[in-house]
Image: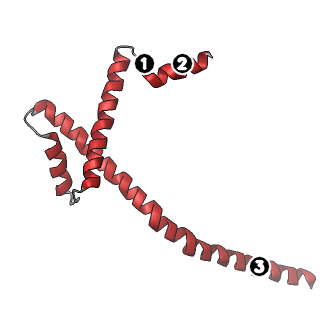
Amino acid sequence: MSNEIINVLVENVSKIVISVIGILITSVVLPWFKKDVIPWLKEKELYNIVKGYVKAAEKIKQTEPDIDKHEYVVSQLKKRGIEIDEEVLSKIETAVMELDIEFLDGLMKIFGLKSEEEEAEKETKED
């Protein structure tokens, strides 16, 4: 008899706990996800798209020197239906700078040079 009561009690408490967890997820986690996570993912996706077009513009510039790389990137983004605003222009500039840094890092490795960060890290290890 007491085992039956305990089983029913555990079953009911489990259902209540699961219901509370469900309520928390739908009232706290989902709104947070919609408010913060989804916009962040869209932002990251937009930056990756911009970066891809910047890389493409660099490649095209090698064979077509007269092309305006910035205009190429802007026109490709417009073709995708992306509105060009200050934020998008900023992402274009950031992608260009990132590619320039990657290029310079590659040159430094080719010539056996180390960046300031690598030099500082080396000095830290020696101490």
- Do the residues bearing badges 1 and 2 touch, measured as CB atoms within 8 Å? yes
Give x and y (percent) for residue 67.
10, 38
- Do the residues bearing badges 2 and 3 touch, measured as CB atoms within 8 Å? no
Whether residue 50 appears in this view of the structure is no
Q: Residues within 10 Å of mark 1 (few under 14, many from 20)?
A: few
Residue 25 versus residue 47 in the image, above or below: below
Q: Residue at x 55, y 74 (%)?
A: 26
Residue 103 versus residue 24 in the image, above or below: above
The label on residue 122 is 2
Task: Please name whichever residue, 26 or 69, is drawn nearer the observer in this view of the structure.
Answer: 69
Give x and y (percent) for residue 62.
15, 30
Mark closer to the chain start, 2 or 3: 3
Task: Please name whichever residue, 56 or 103, is drawn nearer the observer in this view of the structure.
Answer: 103
Mark closer to the chain start, 1 or 2: 1
In what quadrant of the picture does the N terminus appear? bottom right
Residue 17 versus residue 88 in the image, above or below: below
Residue 78 is left or right of residue 2, and the answer is left
Say what amino acid the circle numbered 1 marks.
Lys
| Label 3: element kind | helix
Residue placed farthest to the right in the image?
A: 2
Say what amino acid the circle numbered 2 marks.
Lys
| Label 1: element kind | loop
In what quadrant of the picture does the C terminus appear? top right
Give x and y (percent) for residue 33.
49, 65
Task: Please name whichever residue, 100 or 63, is drawn nearer the observer in this view of the structure.
Answer: 100
Question: Can you identify the residue that label 3 sits on?
Answer: 13
Give x and y (percent) for residue 79.
17, 56
Question: Can you identify the residue that label 1 sits on?
Answer: 114
